[in-house]
Amino acid sequence: MNDHSITGLILAGGKGARMGGIDKGLQNFNGTPLTLHALMRLQMQEGSPLSDIMIVANRNLSAYESLGVQVWPDSTDGFAGPLAGFLTGMERCESEFLLTVPCDSPLFPFDLVQKLQDALVQENADIAVAAAREEDGNMRPQPVFCLMRTSLLESLVKFMQSGGRKIDAWTSQHACVVVPFDSPDTDPRAFFNANTLEELHRLEQSA
């Protein structure tokens, strides 16, 4: 991989159902929209800089565009979930690799890109997925934190056309490496995603 081969994609196209249908990516975390937190985290990643950053959103596009990066709605209809965002990102980016992060995890690690990239290269994999320790002590994949080869576009199109919607069901079809983020300096809240306003407020208080 060269230094300019990865596009970052922020997934902000969901319904926000567990937040009462509001646009989750525009909700404030410590006074700043969640999506802007994600954007700044991507801009501050250690190691090689991202060649580009985009946002997938399906509502309030002008508000997202005001953050200063390209914004695209899902290329499929009906709020089809994170894989629809993956698909849109692959279709729109011009790099060899696509990195995805959700809009609702504002504390993801600053070494996310570097660790996923290193593991993907070392294992000669098609996809690298982050894993984090959850409250029960078990390490679990966090599939929306994903680095993938954009050459997988045709595979993803076929998977979704057949009705597939689960990320892990698609990634399991390819060489996929799971990358643990479990070092002592990893924030235990790094991959926490705020699905409700209550969870978002609790995360604010803890931070």
Image (cartoon, grey):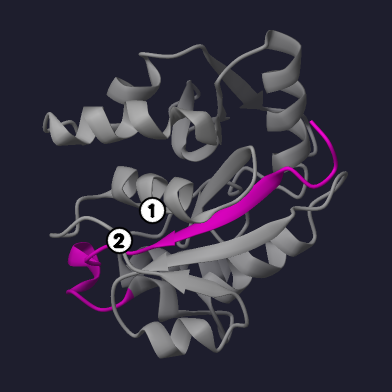
Which amino acid type corresponds to the residue marked 1 in the rendered image? Thr
Callout 2 touching callout 1 (CB < 8 Å): yes
Is disc 2 placed on a helix, strand or loop? loop
In the drawing, what numbered circle is on residue 10?
A: none
Say few, some or many: other residues with alpha carbon within 10 Å of mark 2 (under 14 / 14 to 19 / 20 or more).
Answer: many
At 63% from the left edge and 67% from the top edge, which residue is drawn?
39
Pointer 1 local density, CA inside 10 Å: few below 14, some 14–19, many at least 20: many
- What residue does disc 2 label? 74
Q: Is residue 201 visible?
A: no
Q: Please identify the quarter of the rendering in which residue 171 is found.
A: top left
Over which residues does the magenta segment extend?
Answer: 1-23
Q: Where, by quadrant of the figure, is residue 95 drawn?
A: top right
Tell me if 81 is positioned left or right of 118 in this view. left
- Which label belongs to residue 88? 1
Label 2 to label 1, Cα distance in Å?
Answer: 6 Å
Q: Element type at marker 1? A: helix
Find out whether residue 136 is within the magenta segment: no
Q: Name the residue: 63% across, 62% down.
A: 53
Going by the numbered disc 2, the residue's amino acid type is Asp
Q: Is residue 69 left or right of residue 43?
A: left
